[in-house]
Image (spheres, grey):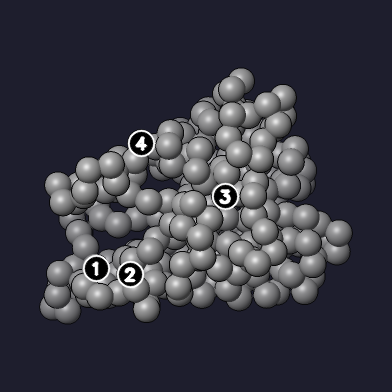
Amino acid sequence: MRTLWIAGCGSEIAKALIEHWQSPNQGQGQGKSQHQTVRVISSGRGPDSAASVHCQTDTREPHSVSELQAFIRREGTPDAVIVCNGILHNPQNGPEKSLQELGADWLQHSLQSNVISHIHTAQALAPFIKRDSQLRWLSLSAMVGSISDNQLGGWYSYRMSKAALNMFIKNLSIEWQRKAPQCLVAAVHPGTTNTSLSAPFQQNIAAGKLYTPQQTAQRISDVLLNLQPEQHGHLLHWDGRVLPY
């Protein structure tokens, strides 16, 4: 792998991924050559990231597709992509506990952040995928988006948008494998990470089940580098196990 594109680079997990791949010691994980040099590019809103090359754009918006395509033409087609875009809450809205709390505006906002941003990133990249491409793609999803695993209810917008993301990944994996049989596409559940996204909900987390962004970055990177054809099109746990959709 020569070039890694980290999309949604404003998130704490994305920042840890950038740091991980730019570290001289990044070769300590599974499947990585200790002397491997990987060029990191990034995209997202906010100030420029620490990545070597950055495209500042809002991937929730349709205009981002053409902006990202210009970025790819300038910087080259990446060998791998990790899309980190996502939202669970903001100061005005939290996960819904009941049907009455579910509002159309917040659901639409969740879909834009958790699904549409991933779609626009893929649409930008699609014209550059050739028959012999060996692209690896990971979208950060969540186990709470699994329909069959849902035993608690609640969190309507987040669960629904992550379930939609999982279906997008399934569709994308089918289309891109037809186009480029060696492409590997999957979603990954990163585990509960000590970030602002999980901060309001950490009080009930069992000991040892809250992970640092650095731990999560290492695990996601290992999943990316060790992707196998049998994992293609699936939602994966951070340890690589296939989770039910």
Of the numbered discs 3 and 1, the one sitting upstream in the chain is: 1
Gap between marks 1 and 4 measured at Cα: 23 Å
The relative height of residue 201 versus residue 28 in the rendered view (above or below) is below
Label 3 vs label 2, nearer the camera: 3
Q: Earlier in the sequence, mark 2 or mark 4?
A: 2
| Amino acid carrying mark 3 in the image | Val
Q: Earlier in the sequence, mark 3 or mark 2?
A: 2
Work out which residue is located at the far right of the displayed protein and give it.
132
Res. 55 image quadrant? top right
Q: Residue at x 67, y 36 (%)?
A: 32
Q: Are marks 4 and 3 in contact (CB under 8 Å)?
A: no
For image coordinates 37% across by 51% down, the residue present is 191
From the image, state whether disc 2 or disc 4 is nearer to you: 4
| Horizontal relation, residue 169 to residue 209: left or right | right
The label shown at residue 159 is 2
Numbered circle sitting on residue 155 = 1
User: Counting other residues with Cα less than 10 Å from the Cα at mark 4, is it few (<14), some (14-19), or many (20 or more)?
Assistant: some
Taking 203 as reference, is 228 left or right? right
Q: Residue at x 48, y 39 (%)?
A: 217
Q: Secondary structure at mark 3?
A: helix
Q: Secondary structure at mark 1?
A: loop
Q: Which residue is mark 4?
A: 212
Instruction: Give left or right: position of 213 versus 178.
Output: left
